[in-house]
Amino acid sequence: MAQHKLGFHINAISKPVADAIVRIRPQLIKTLHHDANFWRKARELLPDAFIFGRLYTPNQEFEDDPVKRGRKFAERILKEEVNKFEVNGKPIYNAWESFNETITETTNDDKQKKYDDFQVAFGEKMRAEGFEPVGMNFAAGNFSGQQFLANFPGTLETYKYLGFHEYDWPTLDRLHKIGLAAGNGGMWLALRYRRIMQVVRKIFPDRHTAIVTELGMTRGVVGGPDVGPWNPDEPISPDDYWQSLLWYNSEIMKDDFALGACLFVVGAIHPWESFEHLGPIMDKLAAFQESTPSQPDEPAPPADSTPDEPPIHIDEPPADTPTIPPADTIPPAAGDIPGAPSPPPTFPGASTAPIAGGDGSGVTIQFPPEAAAVHTHYFLFPKNTPAWWYAAAQDYFEQFGITRGERLEEALFLRGTQGHTITLLNPSPEVTAKIKQLNPAATLDVITAASPAELADILRGRIMQGVPFP
């Protein structure tokens, strides 16, 4: 029998996250960061764990053509590199979620039924490619079992895994206790999965497995801001929070149809730092595991065996990799930059007339009006930036389709009628001043990062917020 059913909800991988996986060996992991090498190592360490992903997307539209949208979203997920690898003949991930918190219980019935169509199409495509879909994943405190049956019949017929989000404040059992005292059975926030499944299981006995894909505490459920137990304005002590988790675990352990609950969050990115479970809570979870006799499902290594290298690691630059140099090369004057207008036109509303080459060659480039009707964006690295820095930004570039490089003339030359943004990594004051001189209407987005890991953290925060620049 499992010692507990507490798993991880991972927003971003890191060495502390890898260490926690090695230490706790959770049997349930949800991740929003899909690094193929990392998860291959995790799968080798945890061959029997249920690992599933959610692909963050700022666009969760489905109403106009639910079936097509469902298939398209599945196809987009299937292109993720992590899906191209196997461990012991099986995909690294067991499953993928559909959309996240996209509708509420007050959404009209017609839209709910369209979402059912979306999920069915998504699930059929994912299953055809060897992955289970995880449906529902609605915000905490939403929906009843009757609504599930009435408006999501296709999902209930085709899905095995149903996801739930559960939060309360300042204890996980607050509203549950109020409900019990009032005689309504409780289970309105924490344990709502059980209230819903009791109804669903009457029609679909033993068909579904519930997964609490987010579990935690937030002041948002009592009308406050969406902040967690470590927010300094109204903090919860680690001891008190741990008591809530012990209560919740004791309840979910009673339900054989519940796979477990993913602690939100292990490996936080901005703005979710106040929800971070790394630290005292992870220490308490490790101590809890150690206090319970280990199960004889894994033979102990021979006493004289030599420990292997830790099974999960985060690739980091070699020790002798130089830090990124400041972008201190002063660009040449505008007339010496091939293709740079001199003087630059004002933005927005730049003319789409031919632009004469600044090198005196007489070459002109004509932009059709439709090509200029965009907001352009260039990510400018310093000259001779090591490859590690580009790798740290790869997810960000793929998410937003941003042009990048080390050529200032390219950064200056791009322009659209809706404006132009230049993201500068560790620029020197001289370079910043020169860009302002050559293109005063461009929006400058300056990022200062001391390492590739710090750059990755900054850019993951932007991905999660759905914005390429502030």
Image (cartoon, rainbow, N blue to C red):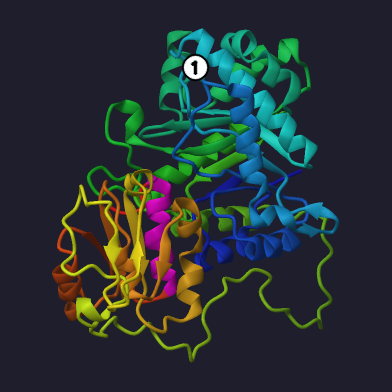
Q: Foreground: 454 or 286?
A: 454
The part of the image, by quadrant, that contains residue 294 is bottom right
Residue 82 versus residue 127 in the image, above or below: below
Q: Quadrant of the N terminus?
A: top right
The location of residue 148, given as percent across then percent down, is: 61, 14
Q: Is residue 330 above or below residue 11?
A: below
**Residue at the image position 62 percent from the left and 7 percent from the top:** 150
> Which amino acid type corresponds to the residue marked 1 in the rendered image?
Gly
Residue 461 on the magenta span = yes
Drawn side of residue 144 relative to residue 468, left or right: right
Can residue 183 be seen here? The reply is yes
Residue 75, image x and y in percent? 66, 41
Q: Is residue 233 left or right of residue 212?
A: left
In-image side of 312 versus 421 (left or right): right
Element at label 1:
loop
In the rendered image, the vertical position of residue 133 relative to residue 393, given as above or below: above
Residue where numbered disc 1 is placed: 186
Is 153 positioned to the left or the right of 442 in the image? right
How far across and down, in percent of the image, does residue 101 sit? 48, 30
The part of the chain drawn in magenta is 452-466
User: Is 419 in front, or is 141?
Assistant: 419
